[in-house]
Image (cartoon, rainbow, N blue to C red):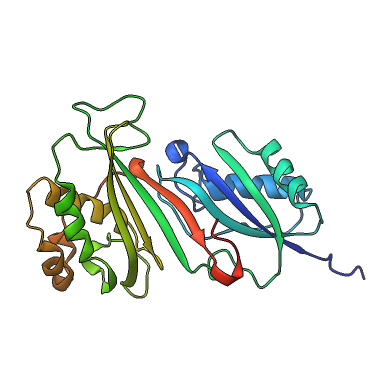
Amino acid sequence: MKGAAEMYRYKITFAYDGANFSGFQIQPHKRTVEQVLKNAVNKIAKHPDPPISVIGSGRTDAGVHALNQVAHFDIPYHLSNDSMRKALNSILPLDILVKKAELVDTSFHARFSAHRKTYRYRVDQGEFVDPFKRNYTAHFKYPVDIDKMRAAAHDFIGEHDFTSFVASGSQAKSNVRTVEKITINRDPARNEVVFEFTGNGFLYNQIRIMVAFLLEVGSGQRPVSDVKRVLAAKDRTQARMTAPASGLYLVSVDYGSNGEND
């Protein structure tokens, strides 16, 4: 009887333009990041049976982008890190780029080893939608007060039950999450407001709902103090709006002692 082939675990850090993907997770009859990566890995492995799975650090929705997403897979071939990176990029479409491939210990898990994630959200403030930015920013033409938004955002910091800021359809067992840091800055050169969120994990649409909420604060539609009230309400209808997927980017996944902050 032929013995099982030795398997090697690779961690990949990759970027993708989410505009033409139906999100990360595999879905029937839809183009997804996970399926495209899986196809490439299995082509390199000469299409084994059963096929090799690619495990991502988490899901992103249709239209969401990533600057440094992370995944791992086990493959019965040993390649140098650079050879694996080049092999994948020679197969992958132009809207995905593997930036780094690393042979790692089998104890590493792209999802369960992650300590924190950072996301960026870009809001264009032009009078009209820019056709060259429509897939890569949200659009909000009304003036916003950055200081008011920063003050309101401070109330999101720490461990909270974010039930009011999670979309229906979430499969999380708990809505308690810890937000470590939020920054809000203007980018005058692009006429954008840029949000960044760092936390131990985020719920389904949580960042997009928080951004929409903060834009309401910044434009005077809500008081600065409203974050505390709505968090305490634990009622999704209190937050109302969800910012579009186009402005959201996964910036980094931090593995602490188990890997680099990619």
Query: Residue 102: x and y, percent?
Result: 69, 56
**Front-most of residues 163 and 249:** 249
Q: Residue furthest right?
A: 1
Q: Residue at x 35, y 30 (%)?
A: 133
Q: Is residue 213 visible?
A: no
Spot occupied by residue 250 in the image (x, y as percentages of width and height): 44, 51
Horizontal relation, residue 196 to residue 18: left or right: left
Q: Count all numbered tags in the image, as a single digit.
A: 0
Q: Nearer the viewer, residue 207 or 172?
A: 207
59 sits left or right of 210 in the view:
right
The vertical placement of 236 against 128, above or below, is below
Q: Residue at x 11, y 68 (%)?
A: 229
Residue 118 spot, x, y in % from top left: 42, 57
Location of the N terminus (image quadrant)? bottom right
Question: What's the residue at 63%, 50% (across, down)?
Answer: 38
* Residue 189 in view (yes/no): yes
Q: Where does the image place residue 6, in percent across and percent down from the top left?
A: 83, 66
Q: Residue at x 69, y 43 (%)?
A: 88
Residue 175 left/right relative to 233:
right
Q: Is residue 95 above or below residue 210?
A: above
Q: Is residue 160 left or right of residue 46?
A: left
Image quadrant where one finds the C terminus: bottom right
User: Taking 174 as reference, is 212 above or below it?
Assistant: above
